[in-house]
Every structure is written in structure tokens, then in C-alpha cells.
Image: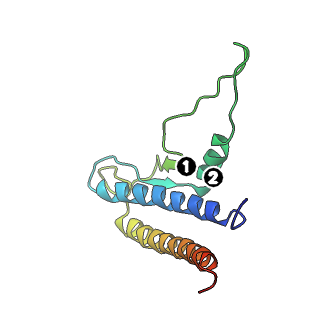
Amino acid sequence: MDLFGGTIKNLENGLNYATVRQKTIAQNIANVDTPNYKAKSVSFKDLLQEANNKALTANRTDARHINFTGESTTPGVYSYANLKYRQDGNGVDMDTEQANLAKNAIYYNALIERVSSKFNTLQTVLKGGN
């Protein structure tokens, strides 16, 4: 039985995306002075595809079957290989990263408010509307 029709799971996926994005932005900001560092970003589409692929499991019944193994990289994260803002080859634009950080914080907080609202609704139902 799915209490909220999958809403909680979708909110959880959104929070996972926001967390990976937050870590990626923080890594970019931390490496703003690192020569030849290339800024990284997160693709929601790639992150969603990776999550969908994890649901697929397969058993090899024959040695000729394809082996399903995952990579150990962070899903959905990619580098801007040819991007550089400074002479030292660094590809981090601090203004862009700070804007992305603020945007991600707003997105994350909105998701947290929505999860909280869902749990408050459930709590009200369990208490009988009191």
C-alpha cells in the first residue's frame, strides 16, 4: 500500500538530487583556486537514469551472458572539460557557483517543507483529526 501515491518516494529522489548537487557545488567552490580544475555539474536526467538502472537486476545463467556491473562514479555528475575562466586553466566561476548554491538551497528547503507537510498530514490522520 502506498500512502501518498509515490509522493514521498519522488520527494526522496528530489532530495537525493539536491544533496548530490550541493556536494558538487561545494567541491567546485573548494577548488576555486586549484589550477586546471574543471567545474563539475549535476544532470538530473542522468541521475534519474542511473536510479532507474539500479532497479534492474539480472542473473547470469550462462558465461556468454553480459555481466551487469555498475561503475563506482557519482551518477549524474560531469565535468566541463573545455571550460576555463582564468589563465591557470581553472573552470570555476565563483558568481555562478554562489548563484547555483542559493538556487539549490531554495529547492532543497521547498522539498523539505513538502515532506514535512506530508508527515504532518499523516500525523493528523493517525491522531484522528485532533
Q: Which residue is labeled 2 in the image?
A: 48
- Dot label at residue 119: none
SS class of the residue under badge 2? helix
Q: Are marks 1 and 2 in contact (CB under 8 Å)?
A: yes
Relative to 119, say whether 36 is above or below: above
* Foreground pick, 47 / 10: 10
At label 2, the amino acid type is Leu
At label 1, the amino acid type is Gly
| N-term-proximal mark, 1 vs 2 | 2
CA distance separating discs 1 and 2: 8 Å
* Foreground pick, 54 / 103: 54
- The picture places residue 95, in percent across and down from the top left corner, at 37, 70
- The picture places residue 49, in percent across and down from the top left corner, at 65, 48
Total number of numbered labels? 2
State left or right for residue 78 relative to residue 67. left
Q: Which residue is at the far left? A: 33
The image quadrant of residue 22 is bottom left
- The picture places residue 12, in percent across and down from the top left corner, at 57, 60
Quarter of the rendering occupied by the C terminus: bottom right
* Foreground pick, 95 / 87: 95
SS class of the residue under badge 1? loop
- The picture places residue 127, in percent across and down from the top left corner, at 59, 79
State left or right for residue 118 relative to residue 94. right
The image quadrant of residue 63 is top right
Relative to 21, say whether 129 is above or below: below
Q: Which residue is labeled 1 in the image?
A: 76
Q: Which residue is drawn at 28% across and 48% down?
A: 35
Pointer 2 local density, CA inside 10 Å: few below 14, some 14–19, many at least 20: some
Relative to 125, say whether 30 is above or below: above
Relative to 112, say whether 22 is above or below: above
